[in-house]
Image (cartoon, rainbow, N blue to C red):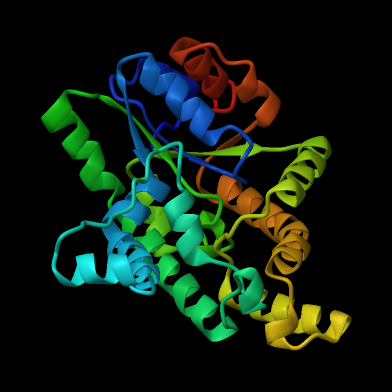
Amino acid sequence: MLYPTATDWLNAPRKHVMLFGMSGLGKTHLANLLREGGDWFHYSIDYRIGTRYMGEFIADNFKREAMKVPLLRELLLSDSVYISSNITFDNLAPLSTYLGKPGNPDKGGLPFAEYMLRQDQHRSAEIAALADTPHFIARAEALYGYSNFICDTGGSICEVIDPDNPDDPLMCQLARHVLPIWIKGSEAHTAELIRRFDRAPKPMYYQPQFLQMAWADYQRETGLAENAIDPDAFVRWTYARALAHRAPRYAAMARNWGVSVTAEEVANLRGAEDFAALIATRLPK
């Protein structure tokens, strides 16, 4: 572990951490809290995915839709307009929109094969963005003078590594540079995340084997053909399964490489000093 004891952590002149857990439990809130304190660099994995590694896919998808409109087609072909996404730390809609949902095309659904292709693109992008973490730690200090660093990961990090393998190459690489911290939700949080997702279902990345099994099970349960499936209904049904699927994977990550805190504890933090004190309670004295 990067910080073997609480004393090592509290006395470290450079604090480097990586947050993981389900979206909606406080990762980005905590990252923003520390960044606003003035001496923490915030590295967002989802932002890096959407700009560096999938930006061209996203922009091309916009252009593909624009080419269906005669006026925009003419302007694009003459290089008279420029189309790109405007992803920010707080607005990742262009990335979610590109990932899409499988099912009925009349309801915005993608063919399952195309959906899986985009999922695979996201997998490669997420691994690359995570592997960039050491580079951004060095860049943040050399270029901007930040000695403290927080990596804000997407909820799907547990899908692109092997959490039960203590020798997983990517996690071992990351653990040499950051302290992984699991923000753990309660049963009440799980119920709220499901309610929130039901209100506004959004595309997500899932492990291929999990997703293929879910797609087959859903077709079998509903008796619907691929192009008749309501995309929102499918992702709602899949999300509840994903929470149960990911919880033990997050727990294994914390057990093998890091520590855990609760979403309630994170919500009560007021600044960097509170955060440092909380993490110290999770490390050996």
Q: Vertically, is 97 above or below 138?
A: below
| Residue 123 relative to residue 113: left or right | left
The image quarter in which residue 53 lies: bottom left
Q: How many marks?
A: 0
Q: Which one is nearer the viewer's eye here, 75 or 275?
A: 75
The image quarter in which residue 210 lies: bottom right
Residue 29 in the image: state x and y as whole percent: 52, 28
Residue 189 in the image: state x and y as whole percent: 76, 37
The image quarter in which residue 147 lies: top left
Spot the residue most to the front: 71
Residue 234 in the image: state x and y as whole percent: 73, 69
Look at the image and tell me whether residue 161 can be seen. no
Q: Vertically, is 285 above or below 78?
A: above
Location of the N terminus by quadrant is top left
Q: Which one is nearer the viewer's eye here, 40 or 227?
A: 227
Look at the image and tell me whether residue 29 can be seen. yes
Residue 274 in the image: state x and y as whole percent: 52, 12
Q: Residue at x 82, y 43 (%)?
A: 191
Q: Residue at x 64, y 57 (%)?
A: 249
Q: Residue at x 62, y 51 (%)?
A: 250
Q: Residue at x 40, y 60 (%)?
A: 126
Q: Vertically, is 270 above or below 243?
A: above
Q: Vertically, is 110 above or below 236?
A: below
Q: Which one is nearer the viewer's eye here, 59 or 167?
A: 59
